[in-house]
Amino acid sequence: TQLLEQSPQFLSIQEGENLTVYCNSSSVFSSLQWYRQEPGEGPVLLVTVVTGGEVKKLKRLTFQFGDARKDSSLHITAAQTGDTGLYLCALSPGNTGKLIFGQGTTLQVKP
Amino acid sequence: NAGVMQNPRHLVRRRGQEARLRCSPMKGHSHVYWYRQLPEEGLKFMVYLQKENIIDESGMPKERFSAEFPKEGPSILRIQQVVRGDSAAYFCASSPGTASEAFFGQGTRLTVV
């Protein structure tokens, strides 16, 4: 059973379109991280959300943490080809620093 | 300050051989994590080490896999008698503490033929 469910699994859009990807869990988590991974590279941390209802913006990316802290979303405005990659959400259970990842959303932005 | 360095970037092994994957953490980082990634999937935690200690190996297969992080030198993930199912990308991450951001290396892509 996957602790974190991400949807959609694959997304292919044209440059300039908007999109939203989701990360859901049946459990409450204290914080959630979003990563982007480009082909042939390791994941890079985009943001950490901690507070229920929190909204964080990173240029054209908007991250939201659900009020109940069981879900999160990432919205990209006016997608660019450079946004292409695998978007992963992750949580860190306990106090060890290890990460539990969702299966990811593969985003392809076509010119 | 160099990032997390993993080598080799690509490794090809025949079935039954041994694979050794190396990870040099960022300077000042004493916590190392290994993850495995299959194609089109997220990363799966394998093992968490601090210098000379294995803290959490709950994600490691019980047989053929081992990891170490010696006092001197890089962390090593060792896979004995590799099988085709071991083919994957293996990523290492390091951090200065459990509450700090972990930084990932570029990974080692293991192909078993």
Image (spheres, rainbow, N blue to C red):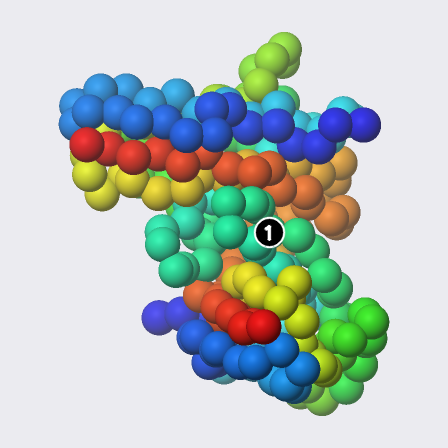
- Report the residue at 62% width, 78% height from top: A15
Residue A18 image position (x, y, % from top left): 65, 86
- Report the residue at 51% width, 37% height from top: B107
Instruction: Count how many numbered circles sit on residues in the image.
Output: 1
Q: Quadrant of the image for the C terminus of chain B?
A: top left
Which chain is disc 1 placed on? A
Q: Residues within 10 Å of mark 1 (few under 14, many from 20)?
A: many
Residue B83 image position (x, y, % from top left): 19, 34
Q: Amino acid at mark 1?
A: Pro
Residue B80 seen in the current view = no
Q: Which residue is mark 1?
A: A43
Side of A45 relative to B113 (left or right): right
Helix, strand or loop at disc 1?
A: loop
Q: Quadrant of the image for the N terminus of chain B?
A: top right
Does residue B85 lie above or below A52 as drawn?
above
- Report the residue at 74% width, 27% height from top: B2
Does residue A87 lie above or below B83 as drawn?
below
Residue A56 image position (x, y, % from top left): 81, 76
Does residue B9 lie above or below A75 as drawn?
above
Residue B3 seen in the current view = yes
Q: Nearer the viewer, residue B9 or B101?
A: B9
The residue furthest front is A111
Q: Nearer the viewer, residue A84 or B41?
A: A84
- Report the residue at 65% width, 32% height from top: B4
Quarter holding residue B67: top left
